[in-house]
Structure formats: C-alpha cells, structure tokens
Amino acid sequence: MNWEGFTDSTLAIPGTPIPGLWGYRRMSAEEYHAFPAVNASLLKRRTPAEMFAQLTAPHKDTDALTLGTLVHMVTLEPEVSWSDRFALADIPINKKTGAPYGTDTKKAAAAWELAKKENPGKIIVTEDSLRSHMEECRDLRDALLANPDAMQELEGAQFEVSGILWHEEWGCWIKWRLDILPRGGRRLGDVKTSSRHPMEFSRDCWQYGYFIQAVWYAHCHETLLARHRMQVEVTKFSFVIMSKADDKKQPRPPMVRVADLPLVPGIHNGVDKARQYLGIPQGLSRVDMFVSCAREYIEAGKPTDFASIRRCFPAFEQEAGEKGGRYVLAD
C-alpha cells in the first residue's frame, strides 16, 4: 500500500481522458483500484481501524463479486470477453456440498493460490461456477431488456467512467467510478445486483452503504465540474436494480427496476444521514479523519504490530464524542 501516495499531489493519474467529459477518464479496474485515493468503499467503514483493514486485508473472490462483475459486463460492457476478467482453475470439489473447496481450506488453498499467481488481476472461478453464473446473468439481461425504464436510463449514457481528483481542501486524492453517466451530467446512476425483491432495495441501501456512495459520488462529480467552471448540482441518483431469481417459498423470476434517489437535502432520511456521516458539505469530514490517521501512521514508521497500528487507526467512533469509545445502546 502506497500510504504516502494519498497525499502526494505529484502522482501521475492513470488512464486516458475522455474528450468533452470534464476530466473523466477511461482506465482498467486494476488501474483504478491501485491508485491511492479516498473512495466510497473506504469511507463506508465506521472506524479508522476498519479503514486500515479495508486497505490491507487480502482480496477474496466471492460469488457475489463474480456475479456482479458479469452483470456489469453484460449491461455496460458487452464488448468485453469474460476471459478478460476471469480465469478458470481446477479446484477440488467438496463431495458433500458439490461446490469447490474454499480458499482457506487445506484441500484447495494451494490450488487457489497458484491460480491467482498465474492470473494476476483476474477473478478465479471454476468452469461449473462460471457456467452457473453466466446462466443467471443471461436471465438478468433478459429482464433488463424487458424494462423500458432501465433501457432509457442506459440510452446515450457513458459507462464505467473514472474520476480521480486532487482535493485542495482535504489535501489528498479522491476517486470514484461511475457505472452510468447520463447526458448533461446533472444526474448519476449505478447498477446493483440484489438477492432481495426490488421493492426491498432500500434495505440493501442501508446495509451496504449505497446512500453514502450516492452522496459521495455526487460531491465528487460536482467538485470535478466546478474545476471546469460548471456549477452543477446533482439532484438525483438512479439505481438500476438487478434482482436475482428466487425459487424458495415465494418463487419469483429475475426482475429489473429503476429506483430514483433524490439528493436534495431535507427530502430523504438516508441521504441526510449520509451527508452528516460524511461531513459534507460542512463539518468534521471522514476524509479528514482518515488523512490524519494515515499521516500519523507514516510518521510512526508504518508499524506492523497490532498495538502500534491501533494507536494510529483507533477502533472507536471518533465522531461520537464519547470518551474511550463508549456509547449508549439504541433501542
């Protein structure tokens, strides 16, 4: 992890600028993730200790990641081949479950590790699991094509565009990656795969921090356009919800819905709480909190022992204002 890079304004930005798109760039997912900048995933972590873990924990490929990546490819990047993002591996099968042994099991750990080493940057899958996910993905694609609102949301938009910006006020790099950038730049969009019914998507938003993501993306987008002397307020963030089929007690087919999230303050409780949580536009920003902890960590010599790391990246809610991290349990 390039800790110094977060606050090094001289770093070269990867990718290629998109003509006429206010500084947005084309870059691979690997280039985007490798660049040291504050992003929504980092800011969703409740404490500095969790932020540190987010940046240093080993990356794990999951079924959710595999399906989500395939859905994005089919929806937003149909020209990309599965072999560009995935690599097949021969992983021992657990006879009891019929599924491959996990990465942390003795019988398969070496096979997973070898596959990752031979295919850097790619998601490792077995042939059977890839086939199953692709069938599920094709069903979701058909549901997408059957929804005129979703197709209208995608029409004429730019997909998978990355923003990387040096933020003068915070003194660090920030980044965000838009699934959908409609014409005009006054609203933004994102594709989400869900195991819940589309009408229950708000539960996903609370659980996975999608309100925080929407507010962060809007702030970054507005900041970028302001650099180009465009005073734009993003008033709406649209989610294209790709709801997977369910064959349990209440069977349902794959379904797609578009849900609009109003970003104007005072209208939506989740948005207002996300603004307060992030400290946007005023207040103690979580970006400031992370940058302060990172600088302390660098000054301490980037220690590796638990106690020293915890002193730099504490595990209590700093913004709660309670001594020692104590809090009152909510009802």
Image (spheres, helix red, strand yellow):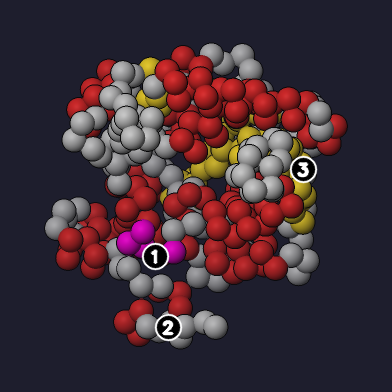
Label 3: which secondary element: strand
Q: Secondary structure at mark 1?
A: loop
Residue 290 sits in quarter: bottom left
Q: In the picture provided, is 103 more to the left or to the right than 131?
A: left
Along the line of sight, which residue is nearer the eye, 299 or 195? 195
The answer to whether residue 11 of the structure is visible from this angle is: no
222 shown above or below 312: above
Please name the residue shown 37% across and 56% down the image: 51
| Marked residue nearer the N-terminal end (1 or 2) | 1
Residue 204 falls in which quadrant of the image? bottom right
Q: Amino acid at mark 3?
A: Val
Horizontal side of residue 161 vs 232, given as left or right: left
Amino acid at pointer 2: Tyr
Q: Tell me the residue that label 3 is attached to.
A: 258
Q: Secondary structure at mark 2?
A: loop
Residue extending farthest to the left is 305
Q: Position of residue 8 (x, y in %)?
A: 37, 44
Quadrant of image for the C terminus:
bottom right
Pick the front one: 222 or 182: 182
Instruction: Identify the residue at horizontal 38%, vertical 31% (top origin).
Output: 99
User: Which is nearer the eye, 137 or 58?
Assistant: 137
Q: Report, in whole angstroms, how far the alpha carbon at label 3 lies from the one at label 1.
A: 32 Å
Task: Give above or below for 182 relative to 92.
Answer: below
Q: Amino acid at mark 1?
A: Thr
The residue mark sitting in front, 3 or 1, is 3
Task: Give the residues in magenta.
Answer: 46-50
Residue pointed to by mark 2: 327
